[in-house]
Image (cartoon, rainbow, N blue to C red):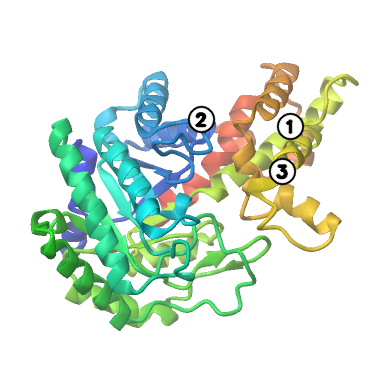
């Protein structure tokens, strides 16, 4: 393990000893988000945890076209560019299970999930979130908890064997049965239920039992986290903020689970006070993803308006127009998530908190439009009144000199503002 993975593996022990411990898990494959996270970690002399999700990166390429080994090289190349020390980097796999293939019968979906987990383990990822909480073809929304645990143990066996063959460090694991949907909720958030203490304890019990049946007691000793629902979520236009009193009983179960911390998913867009309270209550691993690319998109769209003023060019398509074309040309990544009138769907395509536009930044047309925008602005200083008009959230950072008033610096600065919130919350 890297020194950073060693520190992550000890997170529950260090918390039990009285240290205030938390870490943000950066779930994004966007190069500027990753660069921002690594620059941010380097400036703070802090560990950085970057996780690829099952849909972004898998043995079939995912929507980024990257397999796990490709993603590792991709991140490490950015780390080299910004001189971020690799012993402070932890690479993880998020929601590793049958989710990308849940339309298939369970045996086929699990076979593909096993190949994916094997690829992550062979590539040296040292934090593995085992997630078999979704039903496959013919199973309904979710299988029984015992089935979820048995499938997680099956995938852990694959990871252990692959790591053994590759000669790498054995990974740490995260488990769970009540796992929020990757990327935010599909529907209105009017019935969000906090995981009960009994359910959290049962999750640990049945996973321990399932691992033991496969002779994986040693692997289970490296399970560091349990995914639960603390009462946080976001949808297209709403955010449910953490209320500590609702999750007090759940947080109290950690006294009976000294091996573990809780991992909180869908923490995007939470106020800093809510994130801080999550960490204080033992939700020590905070997943964040769409908020980072949402902040990046805000800055890109602001720069597009600025370019129309500073470098007008009738032949250059605005970035929002280019992204609309890209999303309309391949609607599969948004059409099942955005509903309502045509106007409502258009607004959600661009501005939804679920940020499904993030699936389109790697598309050639989107990359070409982004590159054209950045060439138009170049390295020129952008006048403060235009920053105030179109990127007002960065006014203060530009004024105090922490963000350069140039296009690339403003993009990184927008993402960094979100990272600062998590750094404050996790300590």
- Position of residue 173 in the picture relative to residue 221 (left or right): right
Could you tell me which residue is drawn at 41 percent across and 39 percent down?
58
| Coordinates of residue 294 in the picture (x, y in percent) | 62, 46
| Coordinates of residue 393 in the picture (x, y in percent) | 67, 45
Q: CA distance from mark 1 to mark 3?
A: 12 Å
Q: Which label's residue is closer to the chain start, 2 or 3?
A: 2
Q: Secondary structure at mark 1?
A: helix
Which residue does the numbered mark 1 point to in the structure image?
303
Q: Nearer the viewer, mark 2 or mark 1?
A: 2
- Position of residue 105 in the picture relative to residue 200 (left or right): right
Could you tell me which residue is drawn at 66 percent across and 60 percent down?
236
Label number found at residue 359: none
| Coordinates of residue 238 in the picture (x, y in percent) | 65, 66
Residue 395 visible, this angle: no
Observer-nearest of 14 and 354: 354
| Coordinates of residue 187 in the picture (x, y in percent) | 63, 68
Image quadrant in which you'd find residue 89: top left
Image quadrant in which you'd find residue 83: top left
Circle 1 packing at 10 Å, graded few (<14), some (14-19), many (20+), is: many
Q: Say if 9 sits above or below 20 in the image.
A: above
Which residue does the numbered mark 2 point to in the structure image?
31
Residue 229 visible, this angle: yes
Q: Nearer the viewer, mark 1 or mark 3?
A: 1
- Position of residue 287 in the picture relative to residue 220 (left or right): right
Q: Secondary structure at mark 3?
A: helix
Q: CA distance from mark 2 to mark 3?
A: 24 Å
Q: Secondary structure at mark 2?
A: helix
């Amino acid at each position: 393990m890297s020194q950073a993975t060693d520190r992550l593996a000890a997170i529950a022990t260090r918390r039990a000893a009285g240290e205030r411990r938390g870490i943000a898990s950066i779930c994004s494959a966007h190069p500027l988000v990753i660069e921002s996270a690594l620059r941010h970690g380097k400036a703070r002399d802090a560990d950085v945890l970057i996780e690829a999700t099952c849909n972004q990166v898998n043995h079939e390429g995912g929507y980024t076209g990257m397999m796990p080994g490709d993603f590792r090289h991709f991140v490490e190349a950015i780390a080299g560019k910004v001189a971020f020390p690799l012993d402070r980097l932890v690479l993880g796999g998020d929601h590793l299970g049958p989710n990308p293939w849940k339309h298939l019968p369970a045996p086929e979906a699990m076979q593909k999930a096993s190949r994916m987990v094997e690829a992550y383990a062979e590539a040296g990822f040292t934090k593995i979130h085992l997630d078999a909480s979704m039903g496959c073809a013919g199973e309904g929304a979710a299988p029984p908890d015992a089935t979820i645990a048995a499938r997680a143990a099956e995938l852990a066996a694959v990871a252990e064997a692959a790591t053994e063959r590759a000669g790498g460090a054995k990974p740490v694991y995260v488990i769970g049965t009540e796992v929020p949907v990757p990327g935010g909720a599909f529907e209105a958030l009017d019935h969000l239920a906090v995981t009960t203490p009994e359910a959290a304890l049962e999750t640990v019990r049945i996973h321990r039992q399932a691992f033991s049946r496969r002779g994986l007691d040693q692997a289970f000793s490296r399970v560091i986290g349990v995914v639960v629902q603390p009462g946080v979520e976001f949808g297209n236009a709403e955010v449910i903020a953490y209320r500590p009193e609702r999750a007090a009983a759940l947080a109290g179960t950690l006294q009976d689970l000294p091996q573990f911390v809780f991992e909180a998913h869908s923490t995007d867009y939470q106020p800093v006070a809510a994130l801080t309270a999550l960490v204080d209550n033992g939700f020590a691993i905070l997943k964040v993803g769409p908020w980072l690319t949402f902040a990046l998109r805000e800055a890109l769209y602001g720069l597009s308006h600025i370019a129309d003023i500073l470098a007008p060019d009738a032949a250059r398509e605005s970035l929002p127009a280019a992204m609309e074309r890209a999303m309309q040309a391949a609607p599969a990544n948004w059409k099942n998530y955005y509903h309502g009138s045509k106007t409502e769907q258009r607004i959600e395509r661009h501005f939804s908190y679920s940020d499904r536009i993030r699936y389109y930044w790697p598309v050639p047309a989107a990359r070409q439009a982004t590159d054209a925008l950045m060439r138009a602005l170049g390295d020129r200083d952008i006048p403060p009144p235009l920053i105030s008009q179109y990127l007002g959230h960065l006014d203060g950072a530009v004024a105090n000199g922490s963000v350069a008033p140039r296009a690339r610096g403003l993009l990184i600065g927008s993402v960094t503002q979100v990272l600062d919130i998590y750094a404050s919350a996790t300590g």
